[in-house]
Amino acid sequence: MRASKSDRTDPDLLPLLFGSRGGSLRDQLNGPDVVVHHGSRRRLARLLGAALLADMQAVHDLMPCYGAPIRRIVPGKSGLVGYRTLRADEMPKAPGRAATCYFFNDFERQFSEVKRTIAALCRALGRRSGGCIGSLQTEGAVISRHCDDVGVIAVQLFGSRQWRLERNSDPPAGLHDPVYVATRLRDGWSAEFGRTSRTVTLKPGSVLYVPLGWWHETRSFEDSFALAISVGKTVRSRR
């Protein structure tokens, strides 16, 4: 009998996402450093099913029936990043639109295969259950430098997206600070990044693990869509 998608063993999930590596992949993904893998987009169909959006048209087709809030970044007060809940008819379709970022909340609640994959992923990592946000950036959009209080696995679905990454202090500073629109250097990145920062470009099929607390900023030179899967803290054994 052929195993169903939901019957896959959890350890198989990690090499499928991040490829084969020396040492323990689980240890690397529970470690303090960034992990990135550039693989075929096709392999993600097994994990995401209908959620593997192919292009902007697929996003527009999704919006009218999306059952959770969609938020758009807007200018906030005193330089803060603000958000506005979006109506289904507000997604721009014509070229020449302003560069904008959109967040599709509770993405896993819209696609059962994504929900199952996240549960299996957290089991494989020994982490507490997480959630998922769909992240759309139109051409030229930037999400300013910030850090998160969970580990994040970014899965690039279409378009390319650049990430600027830098290790944070321990315990991480800035986790609950407000996000400000950053002052940018000539290379386009936030002036707050230091010499130890690195740049990673994700293409369709790429997967990136960002540990809790790492500073990061993203920008797109074309329309791009990625999933941001949050993974909670390690589950301690009761033994």
Image (tube, rainbow, N blue to C red):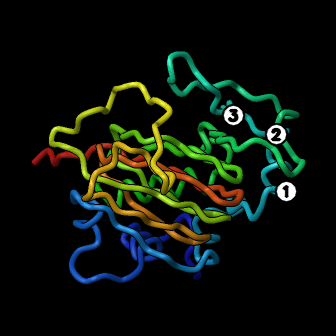
**Where residue 50 sits in the image (x, y, percent)?**
72, 60
Please tell me which residue is depicted at 14% across the width and 44% down the height of the picture: 238
Residue 38 vs 181, above or below: the answer is below
Of the pair 24 and 12, the residue shown nearer to us: 24
Tell me, for residue 70, which label it has, or none: 3
Quadrant of residue 160 in the image?
Answer: bottom right
Closer to the N terminus: mark 3 or mark 2?
A: 3
The spot of residue 25 in percent (x, y) is 29, 72
Query: For residue 91, which numbered disc appears in the image?
Result: 2
Q: Residues within 10 Å of mark 3 (few under 14, many from 20)?
A: many
**The residue positioned farthest toward the left in the image shown:** 239
Disc 3 residue type?
Ile
Q: Which residue is mark 1?
A: 57
Residue at point 62% right, 62% down? Answer: 48
CA distance separating discs 1 and 3? 16 Å
Residue at the (31%, 58%) spot, across then down:
197
- Which mark is in front, 1 or 2? 2
The image shows residue 3 at horizontal and vertical percentages of: 55, 76
Q: Secondary structure at mark 1?
A: helix
Q: Secondary structure at mark 3?
A: strand
The amino acid type, in three-letter code, at marker 1 is Gln
Mark 3 or 2: in front is 2
Pick whichever of labels 1 and 2 is earlier in the sequence.
1
